[in-house]
Image: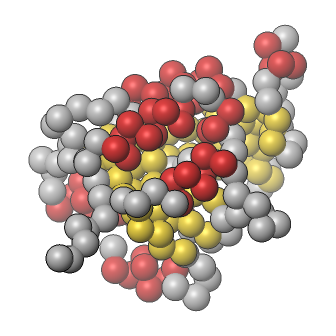
Amino acid sequence: MAAAPSRCLLVTGPPGVGKTTLVTRVFETLRASHPHLNIRGFYTREVRESGERVGFEVVTLDGRSGPLASSKVSSRESVRWPTVGRYKVDIASLESLALPELQVKEDTDLFIIDEVGKMELFSSAFFPSVMRVIESNIPVLATIPVPRLGRDIPGVARLRNHPGAAIYTLNTGNRDAMREDY
């Protein structure tokens, strides 16, 4: 008996290799060629000032956006926000945008989740929502970071080892071929 095809494709690779570019191109191509598909989810985008990355924002597939993390934020609330490197993570903003997009609904044809990483996993509600999506049998295209120094983030490891997940590693050698396919 052949194994069932994977319902979850996880794209991984080093930072800056093009994971977000790949998933947004897949989304744009599907939206143009199959406008009736109901695709839910979000992606993350760099925020730059004067050519320097100063943070990230969450962008829903219908175009709403808000902050995910910033190296410039200095508000009374942000003092308590978790940090990743030089970035303060705005969990409330992430949750207000991403969590509604991760609601499992029968009319959803595909979920796009970019990304399931360290910043997003500071939200206690985020990973359980991702797991409900993965377990829903609705196809998922998601991005995950590569393990750093041989260590994987526990939530990412659970996804990577999920029996329904197939992993595709994007690198500088294969990313241009992937872009041409889409």
| Horizontal and vertical percent position of residue 108 | 22, 40
State the residue at coordinates (25%, 59%): 30
- In the drawing, does residue 10 fall left or right of residue 117? left
- In the drawing, does residue 43 fall left or right of residue 132? right
State the residue at coordinates (23%, 67%): 4
| Horizontal and vertical percent position of residue 18 | 57, 68
Depth order, front residue of 156/22: 156
In the displayed orientation, state which residue is furthest to the top: 76
| Horizontal and vertical percent position of residue 35 | 16, 50
19 is higher (above) or lower (below) than 35: below
The image quarter containing residue 42 is top left
State the residue at coordinates (34%, 29%): 103
156 is higher (above) or lower (below) than 89: below
Colour mapping used in the image = secondary structure
Viewer can see residue 65: no
161 is higher (above) or lower (below) than 46: below
The image quarter containing residue 173 is bottom right
The quadrant in which the N terminus is found is bottom left
State the residue at coordinates (60%, 52%): 156
| Horizontal and vertical percent position of residue 117 | 63, 48
Viewer can see residue 169: yes
- In the drawing, does residue 139 fall left or right of residue 151? left
In the displayed orientation, state which residue is furthest to the front: 1
In the displayed orientation, state which residue is furthest to the left: 36
Depth order, front residue of 175/170: 170
The quadrant in which the C terminus is found is bottom left
| Count of marks overlaid on the render | 0
